[in-house]
Image (tube, helix red, strand yellow):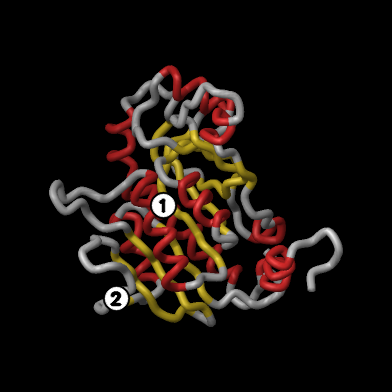
Amino acid sequence: MAPHGETSSDHGVIEAEKIPIKTIVIIIAMQTEALPLVTKFQLSEDIDSVFPKGVPWVRYHGIYKDLNINIIWPGKDGVLGVDSVGTVSASLVTYASIQALQPDLIINAGTSGGFKAKGACIGDVFLVSGVAFHDRRIPIPVFDQYGICGKETLSTPNLLKEVNLKVGKLSTGDSLDMSPQDEAAIIANDATVKDMEGAAVAYVADLLSVPAIFIKAITDIVDGDKPTAEEFLQNLVAVTAALDQSVTEVVDFVSGKCISEL
């Protein structure tokens, strides 16, 4: 029975935080971002997929140190052949991965835009302290807050002491560019980082009570003077290397620890 004021599910989460982390799911939207980590961790592509037949989602898996590592990439669109980026794919693969693999921890890693007004520079890697959506505009009382869906992320003070990462809030939307309405919402969200998946992953992880952390590397300066798409493509490969180095450091730190020790 859970202590007074605590539900049995809350008690279960607290107990789980004291158990060493064994299974990690890393959600990564783009193949370019995923493959260097697949090589680093010496993972193999899943031949007999744990996912429903017909979906393009790809799982790479293996043992690294004492961890069961799973990198989940949503795959390529079946018609257009591009990476399946955005909140819909991110939500689906996060839900399916939790159901199939029962991870102790989710890591959402990826490249993103950053705001120089908030101190972001190309190549910076951020550990996200909070997430929200900026393009789910529902101007009705209470629904407006549901649309924003602001959440604090898992507190990891010990990780921050050991790994050289900046800290900032993340705002998520389904467009690479930024409309004036999006800009106003991102400012209201107090975000330093802008991406297309993070808050969706956070929503599902929170729904199913799985701890999640978010590691985002800056490829483009959203409030800079260069076109976002051009700057993103120009910096993608180099910044992905920085992202993968940081993800490796985080995984190394997690090895042998429980959630409460992060």
Q: Please tell me whether residue 224 is drawn above or below residue 80 in the rendered image.
A: above
Local secondary structure at mark 1:
helix
- The amino acid pointed to by label 2 is Asp
Which comes before the other along the chain, label 1 or label 2? 2
- Disc 1 versus disc 2: distance between alpha carbons? 20 Å
The quarter holding residue 141 reads: top right
Picture residue at 37% right of the left edge, 36% below the top: 174
Foreground of the two, 222 or 13? 13
**Residue 9 placement (x, y as % from top left):** 68, 65
Foreground of the two, 68 or 16? 16
From the viewer's perspective, tell me whether residue 187 is left or right of residue 64.
right
> Cβ–Cβ below 8 Å for labels 1 and 2?
no
Identify the residue under disc 1. Answer: 91
Mark 1 or 2: in front is 1
Local secondary structure at mark 2:
loop
Identify the residue under disc 2. Answer: 46
**Residue 142 placement (x, y as % from top left):** 60, 30
Q: Please tell me whether residue 53 is drawn above or below residue 238 in the rendered image.
A: below
* Category of crowding for the residue at label 1, using alpha-carbon neighbours closer than 10 angstroms: few (below 14), some (14–19), many (at least 20): many
Foreground of the two, 127 or 26? 26
Picture residue at 38% right of the left edge, 59% below the top: 93
* Category of crowding for the residue at label 2, using alpha-carbon neighbours closer than 10 angstroms: few (below 14), some (14–19), many (at least 20): some
Give the farthest residue toward the left: 79
